[in-house]
């Protein structure tokens, strides 16, 4: 399903890339700006080339496939927390599932530190390629932002160059104020540069979306959590809460039965009983205890240099074998 959507996604991707190149291509020095902007054109081509390289790295490199050879090393690198991860075998791969890994049904393999299967990239985002994915998002956020700002500056330059503001004030007989001129200037721009305006709006929307998506994932990286684990923690917390609630209500029932049988106890004051926390309220205090969170510096370093690329990881192999 995702394999089929690959070429279409690639086309959209190249269109966005072209959008940025149009934005930068418009800055060519034919508007009398002189030859000083020429290096900027090559810089923007370099910007697009970096974007393509990051796309290829995210899309085509190994996200951290778990196989019979490296499974023991992955288990050593990611110990089970016995909360959201317990020792289990993958029913498809017939190997132990290291903590934080997941079997991707689309790629048909177990992926270490599985985040999600990305349909746009047609690849899993896992232990080894989260760094490329994050770099891809950040780079394209800046590229789209650059496209928006560059187009805005170019259009503002054209307004100034063609003395549009002066012509509009004379033509409509209006005062030279921002409030009265803006609708006319926008109308003129929409007529003369509709493609560029459309592109500017498109790039600003894409930069907002990509920026938001990057922010969400940056927060996950900061706390050493994956998208997959956020769902697992939600399930775990609600399940634990239910168990605690069941235990608390069983204890409360037992206490009331005991109270009924032994009438000798002095009655509890009404005020005291009012302020006493309900046993169900006490059951609410189930917190996320992420043992993989080792502090912001370590967490980010783990994204930049995945555990499986470190020397300690390969040394575990010699010990295991
Ligand atoms: Zn598997
Ligand atoms: Zn996958």
Image: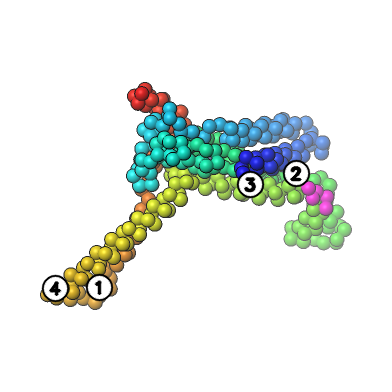
- Residue at the image point whose x is 28% and y is 63% from the top: 248
Mark 4: give few (<14), some (14-19) or many (20+) Cα within 10 Å: few
Apparent side of residue 258 relative to residue 60 in the rendered image (left or right): left
Read off the residue under disc 3: 207
Closer to the chain start, of discs 3 and 2, is 2
Residue 157 in the image: x percent, y percent? 77, 45
Observer-nearest of 99 and 182: 99
Instruction: Confirm whether the magenta stretch covers residue 192.
Output: yes
Q: Quadrant of the N terminus?
A: top right
Quadrant of residue 293 within the rendered picture: top left
Instruction: Confirm whether the magenta stretch covers residue 245.
Output: no
What is the spatial separation of the Cα atoms under label 3 and label 2, in whole angstroms? 19 Å
Residue 278 in the image: x percent, y percent? 29, 67
Closer to the chain start, of discs 1 and 4, is 4
Mark 1: give few (<14), some (14-19) or many (20+) Cα within 10 Å: few
165 up-or-down from 70: above or below: below
Kindly indicate whether the residue at mark 4 contacts the one at mark 3 (C-beta within 8 angstroms): no
Quadrant of residue 124 within the rendered picture: top right
Secondary structure of residue under mark 2: helix
Read off the residue under disc 4: 262
Secondary structure of residue under mark 4: loop
Secondary structure of residue under mark 3: helix
């Amino acid at each position: 399903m995702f394999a089929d959507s690959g070429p279409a996604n690639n086309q959209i991707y190249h269109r966005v890339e072209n959008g940025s190149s149009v934005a930068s291509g418009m800055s060519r020095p034919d508007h009398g700006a002189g030859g000083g902007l020429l290096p900027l054109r090559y810089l923007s081509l370099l910007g697009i080339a970096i974007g393509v390289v990051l796309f290829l790295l995210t899309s085509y490199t190994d996200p951290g496939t778990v196989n019979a050879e490296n499974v023991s090393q992955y288990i050593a690198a990611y110990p089970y927390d016995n909360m959201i991860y317990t020792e289990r075998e993958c029913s498809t791969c017939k190997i132990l599932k290291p903590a934080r890994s997941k079997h991707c049904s689309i790629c048909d393999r177990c992926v270490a530190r599985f985040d999600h299967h990305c349909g746009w990239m047609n690849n899993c985002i896992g232990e080894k390629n989260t760094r490329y994915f994050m770099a891809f998002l950040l780079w394209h956020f800046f590229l789209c932002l650059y496209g928006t700002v560059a187009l805005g500056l170019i259009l503002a330059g054209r307004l100034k160059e063609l003395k549009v503001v002066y012509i509009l004030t004379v033509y409509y007989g209006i005062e030279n104020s921002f409030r009265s001129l803006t609708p006319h200037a926008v109308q003129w721009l929409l007529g003369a540069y509709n493609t560029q305006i459309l592109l500017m709006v498109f790039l600003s929307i894409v930069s907002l979306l990509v920026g938001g998506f990057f922010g969400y994932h940056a927060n996950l990286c900061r706390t050493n959590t994956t998208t997959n684990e956020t769902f697992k923690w939600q399930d775990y917390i609600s399940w634990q809460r239910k168990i605690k609630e069941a235990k608390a209500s069983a204890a409360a029932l037992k206490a009331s039965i005991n109270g009924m049988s032994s009438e000798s106890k002095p009655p509890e004051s009404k005020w005291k009983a009012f302020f006493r926390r309900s046993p169900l309220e006490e059951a609410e205090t189930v917190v996320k205890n992420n043992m993989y969170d080792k502090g912001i510096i370590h967490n980010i370093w783990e994204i930049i240099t995945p555990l499986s690329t470190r020397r300690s990881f390969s040394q575990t192999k010699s010990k295991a074998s």
